[in-house]
Amino acid sequence: MAQLRAAMKGQAFWKTAVFGTALLERQWPVYERLAVGRTWGAPKEVRKVLDRLWKAIPTGLRIQESYLQLLEEHPVEPRTEPWDALAAETVADAVHLLEVFWEKDAAAVPGLAQQNLHFVELFLTCVGEDSDPEHPLMAAELEAQRALVRRLADTPNRDKPAFLEQYRAEDKGNILGERWFPQYPDYPPLKRRKRADMPPLRRTSPQYEQVQKAMREGNDWAQRQSRLERLRRMAETRTWEPSAGETAGRPMTPADVLALLVEQADQTLSGAKECYVCTGDGLQTRALYDQAARSFWAAYALVDRGWPGTERLGEGFGRDIQSAALCAGMGGHWELAQALLERSWTTQYPGPNCQMLRTPSTGWLDREENRVLYHLIRREDGDAKALLAQAEGPWTAQMRLLLEGDGPGLYREVIRLVRALRRHYDYQAYRPVLSFRALSLLRLARLRGVTVEVPDVVEVPPALLAEEPISTADWPLIGQELVDIALSPQGEGLLARWTTAARLGRVVHVTYNDKRGPTYD
């Protein structure tokens, strides 16, 4: 992949377009044969999309969305045979290539190349062979890709018309060569369905309905609730319950308090998705997101006050402050969202805890995206605009749509996120169709007074997009009393007592009264 990336660096987008379309063309003979006699078969439609892609390369004219609808109306479902996965891959790769064309993504070559290699891997898995790079099919595909990249890199842009005319007429080959599935049944052709029998356009996939059914039958949300209940017991008893392989619990230490808050943030964030998919309860889903944000905030606040952390606190927790802020927005607590984002550039951690809030790969939490989001929430559009003028990256498109109040553009962006998620159901089946990012965009738009149509992808409970803040009294944190004491003026005394108790192997029991303060026993 590195060689392809280097060879195509700085090249015009039309060369990326040729590369991607040629690779999809190599899959076409396989899809065409697999589609014969299958109820999902749509060779005419897939061929029409391929021809439109070739037509778009010399002109650069935008491809209409109707071509995406052709693919959406003909998913490879149901998948009843092992080889159906290859046909599904062709349709998914065609959808992805349309998006590459729309975005004019000249850096997409490695990803497009990997898709074809994955196609070969699927075949080799079906026939029981190892998919190592030395396999003749893998080696042939790699060589075909490298040869095409060399031709494209050596072709001056001025020769584009002549190159396209010649290359379009060439045989692109079959990605499987002469190979095929052993004992493959040659299905008898089926009569084409009438247009009236075609399924309606679906913004989501029937696969989501299967995902939802599996999550409900598997009691995913119930299992998540049992994990939260375990945290609740530990907070009440101040005893860290044994994990797998341990025989007994132990008294909680100050570091365990932080670990409990981090675990609560993880469990409520994941639980919100499961609650949404399994129950459709919009209020509880928002409350879980809000609890995740407040757990993040409480852990940060305890770090500020000198509470010791653990290695678990550094595993992605510190650098994902934007997720915490967006969780607060889901709960309607935009002031908390601002306070979390501010930590990206206002907080320094010079002591031993500093390692919890940075990593070698990401450095300190000072991301431009956080600053822009902060100003958008505060409606400081001039500051947001100035930062965006100097910023780069895919995230800037969403922020500009929010800044400009482009409701239709935000709707298209949410639909794009839905379609991107669809491609990952085979290995990320725990996600709702309307993802956390998409929901956050809709809520940010409402905060800024931008009207955005809610996509008709799945039923969206009205409470999920309600604007009133979640009641923290109705939805307290697990260990809320502990957190309140730790963050009060008596928190330093609690930390000292707890540190001593931990050294002696004792459990700390503490209650709080507004008049008397904390009481220990």
Image (spheres, rainbow, N blue to C red):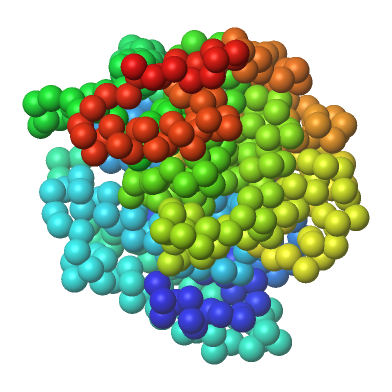
Report x, y in % for residue 232.
Answer: 37, 17
Q: Residue placed at 24% from the left, 39% from the top?
A: 503
196 shown above or below 87: above
Left or right of 92 in this view: 439: right
Which of the image's four quarters has the N terminus? bottom left
The residue closer to the viewer here, 215 or 260, is 260
The residue closer to the viewer here, 520 or 16, is 520
Report x, y in % for residue 400.
Answer: 80, 52
183 shown above or below 22: above
| Quarter of the view holding residue 158 | bottom right
Q: Residue placed at 56% from the left, 37% from the top?
A: 297
Report x, y in % for residue 383.
Answer: 86, 56
Residue 281 seen from this side: yes
Left or right of 275 in this view: 140: left
| Residue at the outermost right position | 382
The residue closer to the viewer here, 382 or 95, is 382
Which of the image's four quarters has the C terminus? top left
